[in-house]
Amino acid sequence: MKKVVCILMAAVILVLAMFAFTGCSQEKPVAASNEPETQSAEGSDESPAEIPTLNVGWSNELHTGNMHLSFLKPELFENNSVHLRPISDSQLELVKDGEVIAYINHILTKGAAECVTLLNQGHMDLAYCSSTAIMAGYDTGLDVSVLCPIQSGGVSIVAATDAPYNTFEELVEYAKEYELPIMAGYHSAISSPRIVLEYALREAGLTVTEDASDYSADVLMMDLKGISNLIPSLSSGQVELWAGPVPNPQNAEAQNIGKIIARLDDLPDGKWVDFPCCTMNVMNSIKEKYPEVVQSMVQVTTDISSYAQNNREETAELMSEYIGLDTEVLMKNDTTYLTEITDHFTDGMNLYCDVMSDMGKFTGRLHDKPMEEIMDEVFDFTFIEKNAK
């Protein structure tokens, strides 16, 4: 009897040991992926080519928002060798010669300051936003490059409808005589419209501050935390004026909430005529790891900018629902769309750097550096120049 029991116990132990061995040798489950699988050819030792996903930011205005045309009417560009093809409401495929080479996640941004924050946090890879914000971001340690312009002009200074002045010159005289600071807003802390407005006011002899307790200043600047707050800030009386990109000034006039007192072309000395503003900007790690993808995105950006420049009415009609304004308002668009590196663009960047240095905006890597060094460090025109060949 003992022998039978021993045999049974040995058998049980053997079964348990075999179960434990087979259980431990099972593979762990593979996490599911939202991206389509890419399989290598049967029998090949090569691993499948990586298809990266890039987070790309632009806003719903007429400086950077034209990139949304690839969502709104992709057939405009589908015959181009490189184009974007939507696969959802917020994701596109970057297609080159019929092959998908990247996935693009669109991030709707509120302004350039937010773009710099998201780039710095690793939540964004490529951004369309103000060049001044990118330079300021680089100054504080952001490893980013400006690849090319996307537009110039399209900025206006808007005052409340009942403001007792109608031109920039009248604003300056009024601010000098008024007992309290005039409240002026900006949608993004280091955006080009904010830099232009503040510097133009300073150059006109006004004292400008962000200290709400400084009642001796002529103008008190206030961060409105996003483009969507420009119109409400005027209607509520929070501020008396601001500088902003199209179509916000035109919308303020259409609603009889504000009036345009100056466009860039109207500012003193003519130095801000059709001035460069927003650029295409990419993290250095992305351009180094995925140069073909970045090159293709530069081409896509050029194609979209060219369409927007040469088809104003069609672009306004397509962008109307996305921006939420009537076509008639969007047609009052004084923006120039161009990705080419021109003397007008480089001269504009030189002026921005001088202005930002004078205003104390550079305190880190760009502090007291000449423009030649800044151009070498922050700007990379190799991609746009390759496209032009």
Image (cartoon, rainbow, N blue to C red):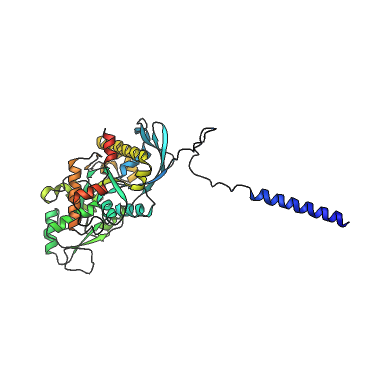
Residue lying at the far right in this picture: please name it. 1
Q: Is residue 126 visible?
A: no
Q: Nearer the viewer, residue 255 or 289?
A: 289
Quadrant holding the N terminus: bottom right
Taking the image as shown, residue 132 lies to the left or right of residue 324, namely left
Can you give x and y, in whole percent of width and height, for residue 150 in the image?
Answer: 26, 42
Picture layout, residue 229 above or below residue 321: below
Picture layout, residue 131 above or below residue 218: above
Quadrant holding the C terminus: top left
Taking the image as shown, residue 248 lies to the left or right of residue 34, namely left
At 11% across and 51% down in the image, what residue appears? 268
Can you give x and y, in whole percent of width and height, for residue 119 in the image?
Answer: 35, 52
Q: Nearer the viewer, residue 164 or 174?
A: 174
At 36% across and 45% down in the image, what residue appears? 286
Taking the image as shown, residue 304 lies to the left or right of residue 99, namely left
Picture layout, residue 46 above or below residue 233: above
At 75% across and 51% down in the image, what residue appears? 14
Q: Dividing the picture into quarters, in which one does residue 229 lie?
A: bottom left
At 28% across and 51% down in the image, what residue appears? 134
Q: Nearer the viewer, residue 172 or 304?
A: 304
Can you give x and y, in whole percent of width and height, for residue 21 in the image?
Answer: 67, 50
Q: Nearer the viewer, residue 286 or 227?
A: 286
Residue lying at the far front in this picture: please name it. 3
Q: Is residue 115 visible?
A: yes
